[in-house]
Amino acid sequence: MKKKYIMAPGPTEVPPEVLAEAAKPVMHHRTPQFRKILTEVLDNMKYVIGTARNVYIMASSGTGAMEAAMANVVSAGDKVIVGTIGAFGDRWETMAKAYGASVVKVAPEWGYALSIAEVKKALDANPDAAAIFVQLNETSTGVYNDIEAIGKLTAGHKALLVVDGISGIGAQPYYMDKWGVDVTVIGSQKGLMIPPGLAYVSCSEKAWKVIEANKTPKFYFDLKRYEKAMTKEKMPDTPWTSAVSLIMQQAVALRLIKEETNEKVWERHAKLSKSVREGIKALGLELFAKENPAVVLTSIVAPQGIDTKILVKKIRDDYGISMAGGQGKMEGLIFRVGTLGYTDRFDPIMGVAAVEMALKEMGANIEIGKGVKRTMEVLMEEYK
């Protein structure tokens, strides 16, 4: 028998009480009983992302929410700014071009966050830009962006600030309204602690004026249809068939988050990720993130001669722990240890131990136990 764990940046582990909810009978999605659960989920999502605005829920991956944002605020011929610090930021660029937009790209070297000065420069040079698309957290590199600072720049600009919060929300501080974010997109399978299949979008008043005037052809992802459904028969509803079982699971997961509180959730992720980083450094390994290291995962440069595609396969197959390798141009060169969602203080110890053993077996020059020892020391300091 081999017990299996997930320490990847998503999908993540799901709490047992959330999994148990999936075993309940399916409810009809147009009943008052289900819509009461839907109302609870949407209200609690406002708490999680820090907004008083409506939150729209759809059955899709997080990329579906990204496309919904793009389809509703961008028209063919628009100019947009894409601030990308990795593979998922590049997805914004690809999507914008698919919708006929011209793209101004701000792209620091991977491992670094967006320079606020460079973002300001791009906004100042492009007063006609319709939107700027950025990530809260970039899982391919393990770096997060300063969304609050970017929001201050777009507050007096025509451009909408559109944020991919798929991996960061539910793990690190985020205040949509206070920071001046115009469109937030989220996926369910990361910090929100349920399986893949739900996506969320929320829009500011500034964004909504653009959405109402937008002429881009769309159907399933038309946010005006979602807004109309919010007031149907005086209770929130969805324009299309709801992913009933997933929404029932989300209700339970959000109760757990509210019980812990946003602030404690953010603090927990910060502590766990710090312990992994310190454990990895104690082994003599290099962290890939040069600034703003993510709390959802730790990105690590492979020792000389180690192919991370082989490393993560070994950790998965021999030790039963799913981690992640590098993406795009970093494939085979870095690996990523997740500390996201349903995680606690023993997860970093287990993860660092698996990294140590696998690397040692692959011939890396490391001292077994040194990283685990440092990880444990940091956790004991953080949880005094």
Image (tube, rainbow, N blue to C red):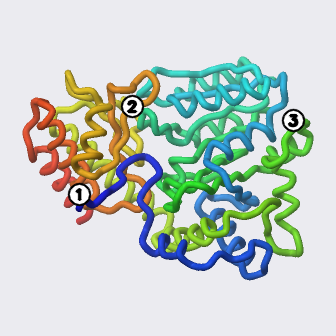
Query: The N terminus is located in which quarter?
Result: bottom left
| Residue at which label 1 appears | 379
- Taking the view exactly as shown, the residue that stands out farthest to the front is 1
Instruction: Give the class, few, some or many, for how many residues have Cα within 10 Å of label 2's Cα (few <14, many ≥20).
Output: many
Compared with residue 191, is residue 137 higher up or lower down, i.e. above or below?
above
Compared with residue 23, is residue 324 higher up or lower down, i.e. above or below?
above
Q: Position of residue 317 (x, y in %)?
A: 27, 46
Mark 2–mark 1 Cα distance, whole angstroms, equals 27 Å
Q: Residues at badges 1 and 3 in contact (C-beta under 8 Å)?
A: no
Q: Which secondary structure, mark 1? A: helix
Q: Which secondary structure, mark 3? A: loop
Question: Between 335 and 24, which is closer to the camera in this rendering?
Answer: 24
Q: Position of residue 283 (x, y in %)?
A: 15, 37
* Residue 352 appears left or right of 292: left
Query: The C terminus is located in which quarter?
Result: bottom left
Mark 1–mark 3 Cα distance, whole angstroms, equals 50 Å
Mark 2–mark 3 Cα distance, whole angstroms, equals 35 Å
Instruction: Give the class, few, some or many, for how many residues have Cα within 10 Å of label 3's Cα (few <14, many ≥20).
Output: some
| Residue at which label 2 appears | 326
Q: Earlier in the sequence, mark 2 or mark 3?
A: 3
User: What's the residue type where badge 3 is placed?
Assistant: Thr
User: What's the residue type where badge 1 is placed?
Assistant: Leu
Q: Which secondary structure, mark 2? A: loop
Q: Quadrant of residue 234?
A: bottom right
User: What's the residue type where badge 2 is placed?
Assistant: Gly
Compared with residue 15, is residue 78 higher up or lower down, i.e. above or below?
above
